[in-house]
Image (cartoon, helix red, strand yellow):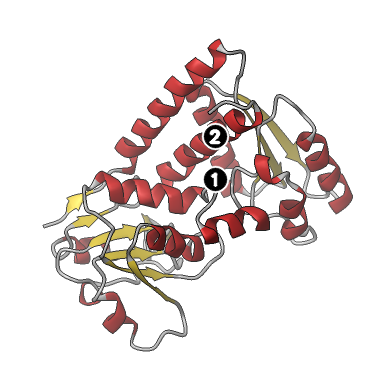
Amino acid sequence: MAEIISGKIVSAQVKERVAKETEELKKRGVTPGLAVIIVGDDSASQVYVRNKEKACDEVGFYSEKYALPASTTQEELNALVKELNGKKDINGILCQLPLPSHLDDKEVINLIDPIKDVDAFHPENVGAIMIGDYHFLPCTPAGVMELIHSTGVSVEGKKAVVIGRSNIVGKPMAMLLLHENATVEITHSRTQNLADVTKTADILVAAIGKAKFVTADMVKEGAVVIDVGMNRDENGKLCGDVDYDGVFDKCGYITPVPGGVGPMTIAMLMQNTLTAAKIQNGID
């Protein structure tokens, strides 16, 4: 029977750590500031943005929200990013994705000053992660690593399999596991005999966006199973990429959905914003 890895507990620990450091920064006249841009009225994005605002309040950050209409032009969005790049009291800039279809998210990401890119999506930051010399880590993969560390399981020497190759989760996830000396295999929709690969994993990270895709026959006995997915099942109930009930008795550790990886993403955004504030103010 598995032990549940609670993202609620681990994220609270991260935010508590960030809040303590923020208190110390404020004594030195520095308040970390985060600007969040949201374009249009995507309901899921609005929930995420509200949660980010709430987290900023919890850890003592200054925050600004820019809610732009869906009709916003590329020029208008670009101009806002450039303005925020120049604001001294804003240390982190986050543009909530997805953007409306007429807007180019790559153009926006490339415009964000890399030292304010707290999502770590800018090509400069992506390259830094590749070579292992980075300021920021993408929030979701960084959160996954915190969850794995919370189990006490050492990553070094383990076989890790990542299902999914997105730029936001799959690829950086593989790099972070590699940096901690795991032997890493990335799988995806074209991988042949997928179950034969996944059941060799001591650490299995599922990030593909398919409800209950990972079943017990795909999981090694005693494995650490991290479920990044956020889907709806046939009854409209929130679920992950892993068949939680089916896998539970086989693995050693597992994250629930909801309450697993989700809370970690926002907690690590707070950590990144704190790091950005320290760097921009010359504080070690």
**Residue 258 in view (yes/no):** no
Which label belongs to residue 224?
none
Towards the viewer: 62 or 246:
62
Q: On the image, numbered disc 1 is attached to which residue?
A: 136
Q: Is residue 88 above or below residue 51?
A: above
The amino acid at mark 2 is Thr
Q: Residue at x 72, y 57 (%)?
A: 105
Q: Is residue 212 above or below residue 277?
A: below
Q: Is residue 68 above or below residue 183?
A: above
Residue 77 position within the rendered picture, expressed as x and y whole percent measured from the top left: 81, 46
211 displayed left or right of 153: right
Q: CA distance from mark 2 to mark 1?
A: 8 Å
Towards the viewer: 241 or 121:
121
131 displayed left or right of 150: right
Q: Between disc 2 and disc 1, whose residue precedes?
A: 1
Residue 238 position within the rendered picture, expressed as x and y whole percent measured from the top left: 39, 54
Question: How many C-alpha atoms fall within 10 Å of the one at disc 1: few (<14), some, or many (≥20)?
Answer: many
Q: Residue at x 22, y 48 (%)?
A: 151
Residue 75 position within the rendered picture, expressed as x and y whole percent measured from the top left: 88, 49
Do the numbered discs 2 and 1 sit on residues whose CB atoms are within 8 Å? yes
Q: On the image, numbered disc 2 is attached to which residue?
A: 275
Q: Residue at x 30, y 80 (%)?
A: 197
**Residue 276 in view (yes/no):** yes
Q: Which of the 4 quarters of the picture holds residue 102?
A: bottom right
